[in-house]
Image (cartoon, rainbow, N blue to C red):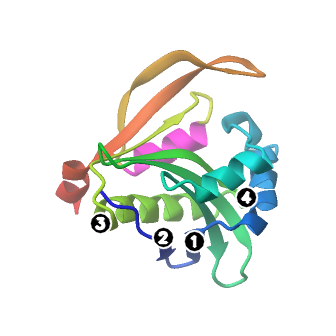
Amino acid sequence: MEKKSLHVETERLLIREAEEQDIETVIQLESHPENRDYLWIGTYEEHLAEISDPCHLLLMFEEKETGRIVGYALIRLDFKSDVFELRRIAISDKGRGFGKESMKALIAWAFEEIGTNRFWLDVYPDNLIGIRLYESLGMHRDGVLRQNYRAERGYLDQIIYSVLREEYFGRK
């Protein structure tokens, strides 16, 4: 797996790497009432470090028609093991299919462009929209890390979902 500059277009979205001027938008997306219970909220400095870190991709989802930012994602790349971890994803315009469209594009890019062997993420059990999305994309439920994360609302379980290279190409 090798890191390449990311610039992906879908039917409605341009997915591009974030720049420093995007950080405030990322923090707003993380802090939104419909997102904040399901995401860790980073600081300006942490997001700035992610932008410059070769093992991270901070991505913006921009609606092609309007230029509006409708979401973001944070990726961690493990080049030694060819692993693509979707650490965070947030969509501002719920119910319009931007989450599914961006997830399909990220999965395709991971396997087809950079040679990922495993694409994975974790989700809290009460994030039913996320769980439905990941299962609709054919992701495998690997298991549950019980009370693995301490948040303001208590100790939270994390459900692990993944897709392997052979599964991805086997479905294509």
Q: Which mark's residue is nearer the viewer, 1 or 4?
A: 1
- Which amino acid lies under the numbered mark 3 shown in the image of this protein? Glu
Q: Quadrant of the N terminus?
A: bottom left
Numbered label tally = 4
Q: CA distance from mark 2 to mark 1?
A: 6 Å
Front-most of residues 154 and 3: 3
Label 3, on which residue? 112
SS class, disc 1: strand
Q: Quadrant of residue 99?
A: bottom right
Label 4, on which residue? 92
- Which amino acid lies under the numbered mark 4 shown in the image of this protein? Ser
The answer to whether the residues at label 2 and label 1 have Cβ atoms under 8 Å apart is yes
Whole-percent x, y for residue 58 in the image: 60, 58
- Per the rendered image, the range of residues in magenta is 128-137
Work out whether mark 1 precedes mark 3 in sequence or the reverse, and give the earlier one. Answer: 1
Work out whether mark 1 precedes mark 4 in sequence or the reverse, and give the earlier one. Answer: 1
Q: How busy is the neighbourhood of tag 4: few (under 14 within 10 Å), some, or many (20 plus)?
A: some
- Which amino acid lies under the numbered mark 1 shown in the image of this protein? Arg
Label 1, on which residue? 16
Q: In the displayed structure, would residue 131 be above or below residue 82? A: above
Whole-percent x, y for residue 142 in the image: 35, 29
Label 2, on which residue? 6
Let me know if residue 94 is in the magenta part.
no
Work out whether mark 3 precedes mark 2 in sequence or the reverse, and give the earlier one. Answer: 2
Q: How busy is the neighbourhood of tag 3: few (under 14 within 10 Å), some, or many (20 plus)?
A: few
